Amino acid sequence: MQGAQGATGTQGTQGFQGDTGAQGAQGTQGFQGDTGTQGPQGTQGFQGDTGPQGPGLGASHIVIGPSGTSSTAMCPAGETVEGGGYDASALNIVNVNHPIAGGWQAAGELIGSVQAYVICAPPV
């Protein structure tokens, strides 16, 4: 026969710390975080070098066409039409006043004359 169980003894002292275990496997990648707030404005950059001088513009000039019931004024070859118009006598009704390829045209009716002019610009 066995006797009665004895009383629980006092707790013993803590043992020494064991060695570090081996590294575990890499975990899965986490979710992408929220976009951060905008950072402060950076400092102004240095001023760049001065660019080369442009080609410049030639002087415009006016070419006057002949006077009559219709008139055409033409720019010299290679020049660009910038505008134009006409001069008419008081008794004339001008019914044509517009640019044409390389020039300007005007025409009138009744008594009197019309004279076209064109503003031309040399090539740049």
Image (cartoon, rainbow, N blue to C red):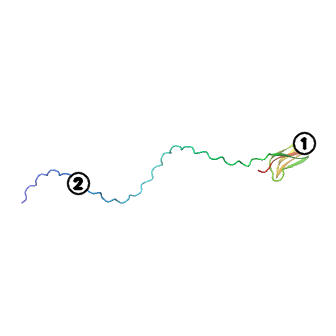
Q: Amino acid at mark 2?
A: Phe
| Disc on the earlier residue, 1 or 2 | 2
Q: Nearer the viewer, residue 110 or 54?
A: 54
Coordinates of residue 91 in the picture (x, y in percent): 91, 40
**Which-is-in-front pick, marks 1 and 2?**
2
Dot 2, how many residues are within 10 Å of its Cα: few (below 14), some (14-19), or many (20+)? few
Q: Quick one: SS at disc 2?
A: loop
Helix, strand, or loop for circle 1?
A: strand
User: Type of residue at label 1?
Assistant: Asn
Place of residue 51 in the rendered image (x, y in percent of width and height, measured from the top left) = 67, 48
Question: At which x and y percent is residue 89?
Answer: 90, 41
Left or right: where does residue 46 sit relative to residue 72?
left
- Determine the CA span between mark 1 and mark 2: 122 Å
Residue at 23%, 54% in the rendered image: 16
Residue at 90% over, 42% down: 92
Report the side of 75 relative to 7 (left or right).
right
Residue sitting farthest toward the top: 90
Q: Position of residue 81 (x, y in %)?
A: 80, 49
Q: Which mark is residue 16?
A: 2
Instruction: Choose between 58 and 87: the one closer to the eye.
Output: 58
Question: What residue would you read off at disc 1?
Answer: 92
Report the number of discs.
Answer: 2
